Structure formats: C-alpha cells, structure tokens
Amino acid sequence: MDDLLAARSQMALSLEFHIIFACIGMIMPFFMAISHYIYLKTGKQVYKKLTVAWSKGVAIFFVTGAVSGTMLSFELGLLWPKFMEEAGPIFGMPFSLEGTAFFIEAIALGFFLYGWGKFHPWFHWFTGVVVGVSGLASGILVVAANAWMNSPTGFDIIDGVYTNIDPISAMFNEAWFSQALHMVLAAFVATGFAVGGIHAWLVRQGKSKEIHLPAMRISLTIGAVAALLIPFSGHYSAKDVAHRQPAKLAAMEAHFHTEEHAALIIGGIPDEESETVNYAIKIPGGLSYLIYGDFVTEVTGLEDIPKDERPPVAIVHYAFQIMVATAMLLLSVGLLWLVGQWRSAAYIHSRWFLTLLAVVCPLGFIAVEAGWTVTEVGRQPWILYGIMKTADAVTPMPGIVYSFWLYLGIYLSLAMIVGVLLLRQVRALEKDPDEKQTQMS
C-alpha cells in the first residue's frame, strides 16, 4: 500500500466510522426531547424511563463522536498538510463555529443528564432541545466545510498565492445548502429506522411492549417522514452536482457519452475500458429529464472529461445505486408504517412487519456510507475541486500505512466498547417501567 492509498484509506476509514456516530448524535437528542415532552404533558412514567434511557445513549454517542471527530481533525493536518496550509485560513470559520456548537452541546447535555429534580421541568426539557439544536448545527457546519471542497469559493489565486479571502463566502458556497439538507434528512432517516428497528425486534421478542412501542412510534414516525422527503433533497442535490461537477454526475450514472436524450441507467456493470454499461436498465431521456426538466437536453459524458480527471466510475456508480436502492426501500417501509399508524392497522404489530423493521434497521446507515462514498470518491482526483489534486496534498511523511492500522485498531476498540454499553442500556429497559428511577431523584 503506497502512501497516497494509505492516507486516503485512513481518511475514508475515519469518515465512515465517524459519520455513524455523528448522525446518531445529531438526531437522538430530538427523540429524547419528544419523549420528555410527552412525559411532561401526560405524566406517564414510561416516557420518563424512555427519556432517561435515550439520554444515556445520547451521552455514549456524544463521547464516541467527540473522540472520533478529534481524531479526524488531527488527521487533516497529519495526512494533508499542503491542503491545510493553503485552505485552512479560508474554510476555518465553519470549523471554529462547530467547536463553539460542540461546547454548547456538551454543557447542555451535562445540564440535562444531571438536571432531574434540580431544574424547573420545562427548563430541563429546554436543555435537551439545546443538545439537539447545537448538535445539528455542528453537523451542518462540518458539511459546509466539506461542501467548500466540492465548490471552492471565497478567494482568488494570484501568482499561486491565495488572496482576497472571504470566509463568509467560503462557508456559504454553492454546495453547502444542498449537501446540508440532504445530510440532515439522511441522518433522520438512518437514525429513525435504526432506533425503531431495534425496538421493533425487542417487541417481536416479547419484551416490555409498554416502553418499546412508544419508542417505535417516535423514532419510526420521524424516520418515515424524513424518508418521504429525502428523494426531493436528492433530486435537488443531483441537479446541483450536474451544474458544478459534471464528472461526478457522469460517474454516478455511468454516463460515458455526451448526448441528447440521455438515458437514466438503473443498475448495470460499467466497463471503463470500452466505456459501456452492461446489464443495465435504461430509461431513454430519463437523465436529461431529471437534470434539466426535459427529455432532450444534452448531458455531459465522461468522454469529455480528461482521463486523469475522471473519478473511479465503478466505485461511484455502485455506491450511488446502493444509496438510491436503500433509500427507496426505506421509503416504502416508512410509507407502510405511516399508513398503518394513521389507520390503526393491525399489521404494524404483526410478527412479519416487526421482522421487516428489524431487517431494514441498518439500511439507513448503509445509505449514508454509500452517499459519502459518492461525495468523496466522486470528487477525485481533486481534494479541492478543480484547484488542488489529492496526490499533491498528501503528507511526505513515510510510514503512513502503520498509522492506518493503528487507527483501525482504535476504531474497532471503540465500536466494541459502544456495542457493550448499548447492550447494557437495552437490557436496562427490560426492568419494570414503574421501578423507581433513583438516578432521576
């Protein structure tokens, strides 16, 4: 493994690991706040117990996300020093603001965890809302920094020197809104179905339905609504990518030839040597329509992109197909859930449907991982699109491959620790819901 591949692999490992904890850390506080709100309005102890259980989960994911996020910040300087030297002064603002949001989140989480019986009930609830809002703000700010890498703006390059730096323009670049919107909705979908699927499996196993059914209603309803909305944000994002990064769009669709009436390709195996796609379903004019609103407009193909500036087509195309397929499946299951809730249908409590919810539990995070693969691999060979190539930004320090294996060990250890802690929380939920909550006194 050469140094460039090792550096890219380590960054990919860190991002793919961190994004799971970041998504859960952003969204779980809202589930917690909703459960807490219902408790305050109804006085039902089951919602108090659910709130406490979810708040402990929020704390676990907050700490893990903080560790993996801190490691990522070190990696940026360790693996990509040239990039940080040139780009740091330009896109540093969203990272600085993200740090502020992180500290607010940490303080609010401390207030919430230890505030039972010490604060006014509604102020206590408000601190939980602050945890969610600040966590969401952190995620949006980090995505804004990543969006700048896809749509660099807010500076001029004069004689190889970055000048006329405008941090506000850099932060609110052309890509930030579409990426942030899509990422937030994806986080709601992934977390909602993951949490709901776990509780559905416990209901299927005959565990404490009095607590798991309310948990399902909160998490799955939010996840299902987000699943219905995400195709719209995905369509908006795809149109934006077509405008700014035609090579990425072409790789996503395995669209090799610039042509009118461009077909929408579903599935298929791309062959980069012959520039063809085998075994695909093609909808004539479909891609032109999705991007431009008509079936005729020409769509740029990879043949018009220099070969040394093309992303790895197969990886990007497969990741895109996985993302879309899993999103459509979750949309269908979410629609079944919402209709069942609306009509009080018996099937939402049947064994087959509970099994289905448990089976699709991880699909949201598979879609998130696939989407980030499309975003990051689809930008290659650029680390700063159109300006700086990844190969020119990698560290000259030898032995990066050893750093990769070290980080892999750390992440695997963290994953096991989190798994054990979450298992303990799930088992704690099986206690009598009316048992006295001494930790909340």
Image (cartoon, rainbow, N blue to C red):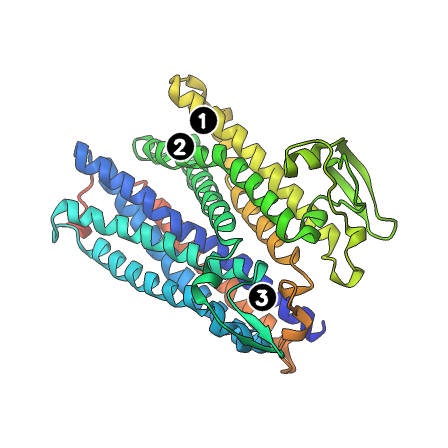
Q: Which residue is mark 3?
A: 11
* Residue drawn at (36%, 31%) of the image: 217
- Contact (CB < 8 A) between labels 3 and 1? no
Mark 1 residue element: helix
Q: Which residue is mark 2?
A: 221
Whole-percent x, y for residue 203 in the image:
40, 32
Q: Which residue is mark 1?
A: 337
Mark 2 residue element: helix
Q: Amino acid at mark 3?
A: Met
Sequence-wise, the earlier of marks 3 and 1 is: 3
Report whether residue 125 is seen.
yes
Whole-percent x, y for residue 154 in the image:
50, 65
Whether residue 247 is situated above or below residue 190 in the rendered picture? below
* Residue drawn at (70%, 36%) of the image: 288
What numbered label is drawn on residue 94? none
Determine crowd level at label 2: few under 14, some 14-19, many 20+ residues with C-alpha closer than 10 A: many
Position of residue 255 in the picture relative to residue 204 (left or right): right
* Residue drawn at (39%, 68%) of the image: 96
- Contact (CB < 8 A) between labels 2 and 1? yes
Whether residue 97 is situated above or below residue 119 in the rendered picture? below
